[in-house]
Amino acid sequence: MGIILGIDVGGSTTKIVGMKPDGTLISTMLVKAYDQLTSLYGALGNYMDTNRLELSSVQDIYITGVGSSYLNGNIYGIPTHRVEEFSAIGMGGLFLAGIDQAIVISMGTGTAFVQANKGSYKHIGGSGVGGGTLIGLGCRMTGADDFDSLCRLADKGSLKNVDLTIGAISKKNISTLNAEITAANFANLNSYTTEADIALGLVNMVLQTIFTLGVFAARGTDTPDGPIILTGSLTVLNQIDETRDAFSALYPNRFILPHDAAFATAIGAALHGCGSLM
């Protein structure tokens, strides 16, 4: 049996994974390009070359993501199957977390929330706040010109000159909210605020918004305190662990950040070729 490729063609990046029919992950790769088809074929060629694979070794290709609509027919004569994106998000998230039920958050250019029960995947909502928001505002408000430079800038920032905290407006904790909890994003800008502070404030605001919406999404299900799986491109942000710790202290939900979380949707697509694991 040959290998299975899962490809997630997003708005600005393409993620590709190789998988054996038994679900064993071979490797992952991310490629950026100016248009979806260039990104898709560039990712495929790069992946095959890097892993020293021949096209003849590929059994099937499973493709998903918003950019997959630009592709017609098979890729290089290999049977190519389209996978509904929300199914791929849910399946990939559960697989990486090793559980059977959760809210799966996919943090890409925008953000999607999927109620995932093994074998059943329901899109329950989304938000325009995501990586696109971060890059757009970040490049406009700071000297950063892309995602990587914005992340490096944010790593040098401090939230003290950006956000207003509970401790700044109250002498005591408010209910379960301690002094370090954000009361208002960007409400404490002052003459000492630097571009690095602003970059970090944007990262913090986007992550907090996504996590809060994830909690609200879980409350709309029959397991409101259930686990929430974090996936997508924004899981590479250095600040995500700190945000997860803060929300874990506030809410009963378990926030799971699995290994290879950025590739969850591509992995979910590939899993559609592994019948025994669906």
Image (spheres, rainbow, N blue to C red):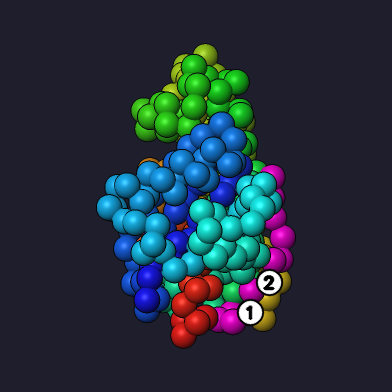
Residue 269 is tagged as: none
Provide residue 231's location: percent of width, then percent of height: 49, 58
Q: CA distance from mark 2 to mark 1?
A: 7 Å
Residue found at x 59% / y 35%: 35
User: From what the image shows, is residue 201 above or below residue 235?
Assistant: above
Residue found at x 51% / y 53%: 76
Provide residue 193's location: percent of width, then percent of height: 49, 20
State which quadrant residue 81 falls in.
bottom right
Residue found at x 52% / y 14%: 191
Mark 1: which amino acid?
A: Ser
User: From what the image shows, is residue 211 above or below residue 34?
Assistant: below
Provide residue 42's location: percent of width, then percent of height: 46, 41
Provide residue 196's location: percent of width, then percent of height: 44, 24
Q: Can residue 275 be seen by looking at this rendering?
A: yes
Quick one: SS at disc 1? strand
User: From what the image shows, is residue 245 above or below residue 36?
Assistant: below
The chief SS type of the magenta part is strand
Residue found at x 49% / y 67%: 60
* Residue behind mark 2: 122
Residue 120 is tagged as: 1
Q: Marks 1 and 2: in contact by CB < 8 Å? A: yes
Quarter of the image with the N terminus is bottom left
User: Which stretch did the figure color magenta?
Assistant: 117-128
Q: Is residue 127 magenta?
A: yes
Mark 2: which amino acid?
A: Lys
Q: Nearer the viewer, residue 159 or 74?
A: 74
Q: Is residue 158 magenta?
A: no
